[in-house]
Amino acid sequence: MKSAYKTELADAAGVSRTTFWRWMKENRCQLARLGVKRKSKMLPPRAVQWICQQYGIDW
């Protein structure tokens, strides 16, 4: 797994960026544990892997 921008994952999930931001907001505590800051545009590999597993995104 590699780092990715939030917009790339939103596109891969087939949802709007607004919907993806809501997903991020719902999981803010878990993402903080994975090293994601609130304003981060780039997600670290561990966070990308977790998000892909959580939402069924093929990355």
Image: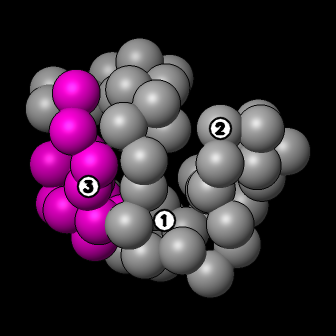
Residue at position x 62%, y 81% from top?
39
Distance between the alpha carbons at the discs numbered 1 and 3: 17 Å
Of tags 2 and 1, the one toward the viewer is 2
Q: Which residues are magenta?
A: 1-14
Location of mark 3 (residue): 4
Q: Is residue 57 above or below residue 6?
A: above
Going by the numbered disc 1, the residue's amino acid type is Thr
Quadrant in which the N terminus is drawn: top left
Position of residue 49 measured from the top left corner of the image (x, y, whole percent) = 38, 26
Distance between the alpha carbons at the discs numbered 2 and 3: 14 Å
Residue at position x 26%, y 55% from top?
4
Distance between the alpha carbons at the discs numbered 2 and 1: 21 Å
Whether 7 is among the magenta residues is yes
Of tags 1 and 3, the one toward the viewer is 3
Is 49 on the left-hand or right-hand side of 21? left
Of label 1 and label 3, which has the lower sequence position? 3
Q: Quadrant of residue 2?
A: top left
Can residue 58 be seen in the rendering of this structure? Answer: yes
Q: Is residue 57 above or below residue 11?
A: above
Location of mark 2 (residue): 34
Going by the numbered disc 2, the residue's amino acid type is Leu
Going by the numbered disc 3, the residue's amino acid type is Ala
Which of the pair 44/24 is nearer the observer? Answer: 44
Quadrant in which the C terminus is drawn: top left
Residue at position x 76%, y 49% from top?
32
Q: Secondary structure at mark 2?
A: loop
Of label 2 and label 1, which has the lower sequence position? 1
Q: Which mark is residue 19?
A: 1
Residue at position x 68%, y 66% from top?
37
Q: Residues within 10 Å of mark 2 (few under 14, many from 20)?
A: some
